[in-house]
Amino acid sequence: MTRAVRLALTLLMVGMCAAAAPRTASAQFGQPMTPAEQMLAQRYPDQWAALTPEQRERVLQNYRRWQQMSPEQRNAVRQNYEQFRSLPPDERARVLEGLHQWRSLPPARREQLREQYMRFRQLPPDQRNQMIQRYQRFQQLPLAQREQLMRNYQRWQMMTPEQRHEARRHWSQRKNHPPPP
């Protein structure tokens, strides 16, 4: 998931939090509410009453995160939220489904994906574009071919460095010397 999409979804959560602000003087879980949170709570009493205790705690957590952001971070989140809102409904649904899948991943897997994404972002622009183009070509392949490529990739991952070297050598020889007619 891209940083922009994550930020858009963060703002979406903050926006939902603001619309369902707390009215009670203390939270059901965690830290007691600050005066600012109590003031926010009084703005939307009906929405707050409709939330479960877990949802109320989540609202407070999101509000606290929002309060800790710098003005630049808040502005970036707002911009991404507006971009998210401008998406067609089916695309918004796809983004939200991606968020649900992301949240269902184990924390270790999410961290691994974050690291891979950061490595991707650090690539020179031409290499990033090349990877994007390869992915787009992969997406255009028929399903059976994509599945075969994924199986081949899994086999490649299981090979030792020596086996990979030998496979590269064999493939190079086949590429340079096509079979006779």
Image (cartoon, rainbow, N blue to C red):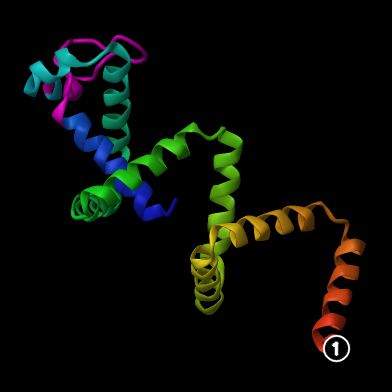
Q: Is mark 1 on a helix, strand or loop?
A: loop
- Estimate the x, y position of residue 143 in percent, counting from the top left: 55, 57
Q: Is residue 77 left or right of residue 167?
A: left
- Which residue, given by chain and number where applicable, does mark 1 sit on? 177
**Camera-side residue of 52 and 148:** 148
The region drawn magenta spans 19-39
The residue sitting at 32% across, 41% down in the picture is 10
Q: Does the magenta stretch include residue 94?
A: no
Which quadrant of the figure contains the C terminus?
A: bottom right
The residue sitting at 54% across, 49% down in the picture is 114
- Estimate the x, y position of residue 152 in percent, counting from the top left: 73, 58
Q: Does the magenta stretch include residue 30?
A: yes
- Estimate the x, y position of residue 146 in percent, counting from the top left: 59, 59
Number of marks present in the image shown? 1
The residue sitting at 85% across, 64% down in the picture is 164
Q: Is residue 86 left or right of residue 13?
A: left
Q: In this view, does 115 lie above or below 134?
A: above
Can you tell which quarter of the image residue 156 is in?
bottom right
Q: Is residue 55 left or right of residue 149?
A: left
**Principal SS element in the magenta part?**
loop
Q: What residue type is labelled 1?
A: His
The residue sitting at 85% across, 85% down in the picture is 179
Local packing at callout 1 (Cα closer than 10 Å; few below 14, some 14-19, many 20+) is: few
- Estimate the x, y position of residue 117 in percent, counting from the top left: 53, 56
**Camera-side residue of 107 and 152:** 152
**Camera-side residue of 123 and 25:** 123
Q: In this view, does 3 lie above or below 177?
A: above
Q: In this view, does 147 lie above or below 48?
A: below
Q: Residue furthest front?
A: 181
